[in-house]
Amino acid sequence: MDDKSGRMEWILDVAEKYRAQIRRGPFFQSLEQIERVNDIKWVHQLIHQSREFTQALCLRYSLCHDKRYQRIFAEHAVEEADHPDQLIAWMAKYGFLSDVEGGAIPATRETIDSLAYCWRSAVHEPHDVQVIVLNVLSEGIALDFYTAVIPVLKRLDILSGRYWNIHREVDSRHLRMGLDLCGNVPSDSPTGMHYQRVLAHAASLYHQMLSSWVGKRGEPLER
């Protein structure tokens, strides 16, 4: 890690504060009760998230004209590009698509809200804020998700293919991508405070999205 990235460690700490609360929420708690393959119906919501988050990353790159960020955004988009197809192949292999096509089950309202914020970030927000939303927080939550879900799939003997394990390998790197380009932003500066508000809002959306996947409403996150 270079010095610039090191000076922004505080933003990772703030993100972790929200991630830790989400890990104590309904979705992660429900993983302990999973006994059968049929108990992970939320995989039908995951395909919506996988497809549209990947599309948001591709859109972010296509709209970026700042050469400092272009390489990072392109690398991130390319490394995510085939993940939805990998997930669909896995779902087909284990019978999740025996009577329904991938994506045919409607996304929950909370999933739509979270994805809409990712799309909005990719289209309207400055590049540094995009890094905070689409890298620092989104990929951090993804890392927590796959780290928790992979042992469950292994226990059910349905852990196979590249989709699941590749996330555990790349998400920890993706969450830091572009952070060094944001500069040395103090946490108590106007920009730093804005980053914190963005993190709080995005984390709340992700928290409710994951909770909705198990039919629950998450408790408000503490700031």
Image (cartoon, rainbow, N blue to C red):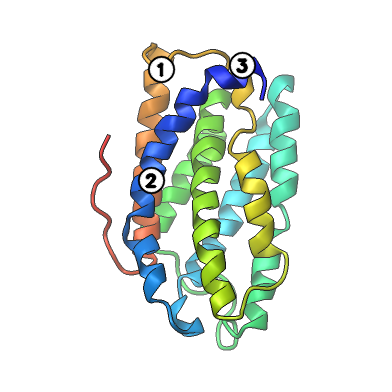
Side of 72 where 223 appears, left or right: left
Quadrant housing the N terminus:
top right
Residue ID at (39%, 66%): 213
Q: Position of residue 68 (x, y in %)?
A: 71, 20
**Residue mark closest to the camera, 1 vs 2:** 2
Side of 181 where 13 appears, left or right: left
Q: Position of residue 200 (x, y in %)?
A: 35, 36
- Residue 84 at least partly seen: no
Residue ID at (69%, 41%): 76
The Cα atoms of the two marked residues, 1 and 2, are separated by: 20 Å
Q: Which mark is residue 187?
A: 1
Q: Amino acid at mark 3?
A: Lys
Quarter of the figure with residue 29 = bottom left
- Which one is earlier in the sequence, the residue at label 1 or at label 2? 2
| Count of numbered labels shown in the rendering | 3
The Cα atoms of the two marked residues, 3 and 2, are separated by: 25 Å
- Residue 74 at least partly seen: yes
Quadrant housing the C terminus:
top left
Residue ID at (43%, 38%): 16
Vertical position of residue 142 compared to residue 202: above or below: below
Q: Amino acid at mark 1?
A: Ser
User: Alpha-carbon neighbours of circle 2 within 10 Å: few (<14), some, or many (≥20)?
Assistant: few
Q: Which mark is residue 4?
A: 3
